[in-house]
Image (cartoon, rainbow, N blue to C red):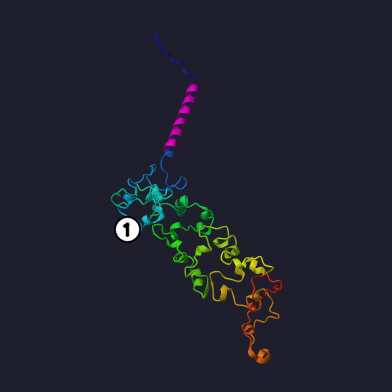
Amino acid sequence: MSRWKTCPARPDSQRADIGRRARRLAGTLLLIAFAAVPAFAGAADAPAGATAAGAVPTYSPHGANTCLLCHRTAKVKAIFSTPHAAKSDSRTPFAGRQCEACHGPGGQHIKPPGPGQKRTPMPFFAPNSPVTVKQENGRCLTCHNDAHRMAWKGSVHQRHDVACVSCHTIHAKHDPALSAATQPKVCYQCHQGIRADFAKFSHHPVPTGQLKCSSCHNPHGSFGPQLLVGDTVNQTCYQCHASKRGPFLWEHPPVQEDCTSCHTPHGSVNPDLLVSRPPLLCQQCHQSAGHPSIAFGPNGLPGKRPNGFLLSRSCMSCHSEIHGSNDPSGAPLSR
């Protein structure tokens, strides 16, 4: 008699249930296998046409050494003088996939093209790259996702598809967009009207490198108007002009509302960045009765002896504390 027992036949329904469970297990194992493949663009941002249909993206065998076989220019090799190439910092590209950490898998790119064919472009940051500006910017935001860039989504630059590499020179030892001496020229590529304002006789010291555009504006997005670093115009101005913040015993309402009511921030043909010259500036709100805007001549003055304060006809000749006063007698902002 055999010591092996014969297994009883299973009902058809039970065999079908076992088959379903086996197929479910096989599908789970397949998903685990795909999850183990290194991702380079994310499921939503996978570049169309970067690899053959159904092929798994492959990386070059020796990282940057493979790239430098062809890309040996000084412009490319300057990357080794930047923070991106610090292998000792685990957050940098060169601590991992090196060039391909940003440019994507280059396995297809390094293969020689066939007769009459063009070499497959790198997935990211290359001429004829198949990805969008949004996908390329996503590569940068993978690492640069700190509080300084938390308002990028929905910002004016993001809505207009401005690429990070349109402003930043990643391979340069000193990125022009980060230096006070060169940053304005980067911004002027688009904001040419602002360049003209800074050429006017009264302007903030941006052309001399004492300030840069990002001193007042956050190009990566802001919760304030006009990409300002402060929540309001005044909060931004108070970073430097703290003496105008107040509170004052006697306040000038336009000062507390908006500095640009009287000043134009980039440059003006009038003194002190004023939008127009006093008394015409003041008379936009204040009636001219008793304060004529026509300068007195010598014949219209007592004794025909001109006085410098009257001849200038500047409101600030008398109302010297125009931003606010803490003097008990300073209601007219005169002391």
Q: The C terminus is located in which quarter? A: bottom right
Quarter of image, res 34: top left
Give the residue displayed 67% in from the left and 91% down from the top: 303
- Residue 155 coordinates in the image, percent (x, y): 53, 57
Name the residue located 44 percent from the left edge and 60 percent from the top edge.
Answer: 166
The tally of labels here is: 1
Q: Left or right: 120 with respect to 281?
A: left
Q: Left or right: where does residue 302 sit relative to residue 143? A: right
Residue 65, placed above or below residue 4? below
Q: Amino acid at mark 1?
A: Thr
Q: What percent of the width, then of the height, locates residue 104? A: 39, 49
Q: Is residue 282 above or below residue 110?
A: below
Residue at left offset 44%, top offset 33%: 29
Q: Quadrant of the N terminus?
A: top left
Main SS of the magenta segment?
helix
274 w.r.t. 157: above or below: below
* 53 on left or right of 236: left
Q: Which residue is mark 1?
A: 73
Residue range corresponding to the magenta coloring: 12-33
**Residue furthest toward the left?**
115
Mark 1 surroundings: few (<14), some (14-19) or many (≥20) residues within 10 A: few
- Is residue 279 visible in this depiction of the protein? no
Circle 1 SS class: loop
Q: Percent x, y for residue 323?
A: 64, 70
State which quadrant residue 3 falls in: top left
